[in-house]
Image (cartoon, helix red, strand yellow):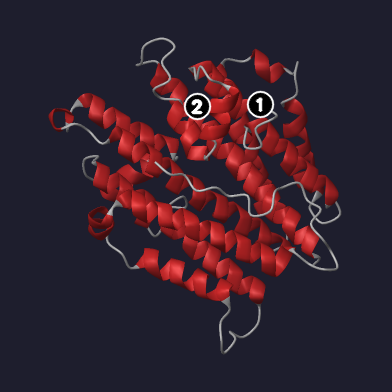
């Protein structure tokens, strides 16, 4: 497979996963805002932090209102991480490799892109419905990919991009929300306390599976444990790291070298570290510090993947994304 094709497949799925995550974040925050004072930015600003774009947002939108946050994350074409920008860049990458992806995949991503242009009927819908349409459009693309793409290298690089982005966003939203939602002593166990943690779980698309898995009351520690360490929930960090490791091993498709290189070492170390750690140890050592280290490790892993598979002397970078463009959130 050409480096540029693998690069595009990886980023198509990263961008669509990013757009889907942001649409879910906004959708849940829209509902949460109903319980806040009109115009309050309380449920909104943490979303900007979760995308790692707070500096750009503060510069472009000094007032920092809820409407500013929504526009920045949904429609701002100057923001490379906005939903419309992500889908546009995913479409551009897909356009460059139309002979590799299936016709159904191209039609779905192309329709999704054009349906988000100014004047389209989606913008006449209520805000919640707009975000639901976008989220479903991304999920339909995943389903079409699963149903029509052969399980070859194209599939593997698609999966790799999706899992990398999913691990990144789950850890980011937990890092931001966890410290904002840590309750004051008198609020522990109250109705508002539980509603806030339910909101965090819904933001990560994890509420129903958490209830089925944990079968106990909602607490900050149990939420962190589920989102970080659950081995079977598809959006947990541990599940994603397992998938990343398995996918990289299949892509390599050759015996392990006597001396593993940096990518192999980091892949194995990350999986082992997050597979054999208890939530109590993470809390004791500082949950933010652990997640911040994870973010740095994911960034390093991305750069090593890019160096090995995407940066070829014969096929220089042509796809629509920045090199090693992940940023680490610092609370």
Q: Quadrant of the N terminus?
A: bottom right
What is the residue that sits farthest to the bottom in this orientation?
258
Q: Residue at x 51, y 33 (%)?
A: 54
**Relative to 43, residue 112 above or below:** below
What is the residue that sits farthest to the top in this orientation?
38
- Residue 43: horizontal and vertical position, in percent? 41, 25
Circle nearer the viewer, 1 or 2: 1
Any mark on residue 76, and which?
A: 1
**Relative to 330, residue 312 above or below:** below
- The answer to the question of whether label 1 and label 2 lie on touching residues, with beta carbons closer than 8 A, is no
- Residue 209: horizontal and vertical position, in percent? 37, 45
Q: Residues within 10 Å of mark 2 (few under 14, many from 20)?
A: many
Q: Nearer the viewer, residue 297 or 186?
A: 297
Residue at the spot of label 2: 27
Q: Residues within 10 Å of mark 1 (few under 14, many from 20)?
A: some
Q: Residue at x 61, y 59 (%)?
A: 160
Any mark on residue 329, and which?
A: none
User: Could you tell me which secondary element the residue under label 2 belongs to?
Assistant: helix
Q: Residue at x 44, y 67 (%)?
A: 271
| Count of marks overlaid on the render | 2
Report whether 255 appears left or right of 112.
left
- Residue 187: horizontal and vertical position, in percent? 17, 28
**Quarter residue 254 falls in:** bottom right
Q: Earlier in the sequence, mark 1 or mark 2?
A: 2
User: Could you tell me which secondary element the residue under label 1 belongs to?
Assistant: loop
Mark 1 vs mark 2, CA separation in Å: 17 Å
Q: Quadrant of the C terminus?
A: top left
Asked whether residue 83 appears in the rendered view, the answer is: yes
């Amino acid at each position: 497979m050409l480096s540029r094709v693998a690069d595009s497949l990886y980023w198509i799925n990263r961008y669509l996963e990013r757009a889907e995550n942001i649409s879910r974040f906004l959708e849940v925050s829209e509902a949460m805002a109903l319980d806040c004072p009109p115009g309050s930015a309380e449920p909104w600003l943490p979303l900007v932090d979760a995308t790692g774009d707070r500096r750009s947002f503060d510069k472009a939108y000094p007032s920092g209102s809820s409407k500013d946050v929504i526009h920045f994350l949904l429609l701002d074409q100057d923001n490379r991480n906005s939903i419309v920008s992500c889908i546009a860049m995913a479409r551009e990458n897909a356009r460059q490799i139309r002979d590799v992806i299936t016709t159904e995949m191209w039609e779905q991503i192309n329709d999704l892109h054009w349906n988000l242009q100014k004047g389209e009927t989606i913008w006449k819908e209520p805000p919640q419905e707009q975000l639901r349409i976008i989220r479903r459009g991304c999920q339909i693309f995943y389903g079409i990919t699963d149903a029509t793409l052969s399980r070859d290298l194209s599939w593997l690089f698609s999966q790799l991009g999706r899992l990398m982005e999913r691990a990144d966003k789950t850890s980011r939203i937990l890092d931001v929300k966890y410290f904002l939602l840590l309750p004051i002593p008198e609020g522990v166990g109250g109705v508002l306390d539980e509603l806030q943690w339910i909101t965090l779980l819904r933001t990560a698309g994890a509420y129903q599976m958490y209830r089925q898995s944990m079968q106990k009351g909602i607490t900050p520690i149990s939420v962190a444990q589920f989102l970080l360490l659950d081995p079977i929930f598809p959006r947990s960090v541990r599940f994603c790291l397992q998938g990343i490791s398995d996918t990289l091993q299949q892509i390599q498709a050759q015996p392990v070298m006597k001396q593993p290189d940096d990518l192999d070492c980091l892949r194995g170390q990350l999986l082992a570290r997050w597979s054999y750690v208890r939530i109590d140890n993470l809390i004791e050592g500082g949950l933010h510090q652990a997640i911040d280290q994870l973010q740095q490790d994911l960034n390093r892993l991305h750069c090593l993947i890019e160096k090995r598979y995407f940066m070829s002397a014969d096929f220089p970078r042509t796809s629509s994304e920045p090199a090693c463009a992940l940023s680490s959130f610092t609370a």
